[in-house]
Image (tube, rainbow, N blue to C red):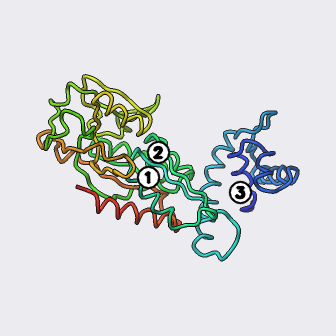
Amino acid sequence: MTLQQLHYVITISEMGSFNKASEVLYVSQPSLTGAVQELEKELGITIFNRTRKGVTLTNDGLEFINHARQLYQQYETILDKYGKGGTLKKKFGVSTQHYSFAVKSFVEMVKNFNTREYEFAIRETKTREVIEDVSTSKSEIGILYLSDFNRKIITKILRTNNLEFHKLIDCKPYVYLFKGHPLSSQSSIKFEQLYDYPCLSFEQGDTGSFYFAEEIFSTNEYPMTIKANDRATMLNLMIGLNGYTLCSGIICEELNGDDFIAVPLAKEDASPDNNMEIGYIVKKDMLLSSMGELYIKEIDRYLQNCVK
């Protein structure tokens, strides 16, 4: 088994076709097919199901590709740190819960690199997918939070997937709403004051659990709730329906705009047990790439400067 063969199968799985992969790799299709067949013979498994419409991963192939991505990602990281020259386009990805500060830090990190030489990706997505993306090496780093409520479950899932959590900052709970909201001028807000307004949260999918909720107090009973899939929709609901969401209080006005405000949740409703511990997840004992190291520095700098 060679690194070249790993690169081939990873590209084929991403393209969903030997033909498209051969174009991307600048390798003839017969050569590509032969390399994969040799690898399958060596491993004693069938990696791809071949159909007229393209290829899909077999069960064995799906398991193998996860290991292949992790191994090849480490190879690329070593080249990035110690290699000289070369034409390999280095990849770096981040998966995150819906945090504007994570996107802002990503922007600042990217500015330090020549985007012609790198392939960057940032994915704002569901909590479970943040974990899966890092576990399968689709992303090098994931951004999420822990609390006393979800810590046991999330930590167990991370451990099962050979991932580790690194704390960045502790945050108290805030109510995030439109500046035109009737409660926006309050110095703090009690839960009872919110009963007449819809509580907004990010949808976690059919397999969603309140343990995967991006908002604290996910088990509370709310008279009105509305779920959204992205930050833009969430902000529109805040304006149009006087909705609110519960958050860390760390807001990037440059990305979200200055029409919104984070008001502290009243002390009697915000016990220390409900604080948010924001951090990042990575593969256990994994060597971070130079992009990964810089991203963590950027996000740490941003959080330290902006936390209230």
Residue type, label 3: His
Residue 124: give its label: 2
User: Which mark is in front, 1 or 2?
Assistant: 1
User: Which element carries disc 3, helix, strand or loop?
Assistant: helix
Residue type, label 2: Glu
Question: Label 2: few (<14), some or many (≥20) within 10 Å?
Answer: many
Residue 7: give its label: 3
Depicted 8 relative to depicted 74: above or below: above
Q: Which one is nearer the viewer's eye here, 239 or 59?
A: 239
User: Which element carries disc 2, helix, strand or loop?
Assistant: strand
Q: Residue at x 36, y 62 (%)?
A: 300
Question: Label 1: few (<14), some or many (≥20) within 10 Å?
Answer: many
Q: Is residue 79 left or right of residue 185?
A: right
Rendered image quadrant of residue 199: top left
In the orientation shown, which residue stands out farthest toward the left? 268
| Labels 2 & 3 near each other (Cβ < 8 A) | no
Rendered image quadrant of residue 15: top right
Which numbered disc flags the more N-terminal residue, 3 or 1? Answer: 3
Residue 103: give its label: 1
Q: Is residue 293 left or right of residue 10?
A: left
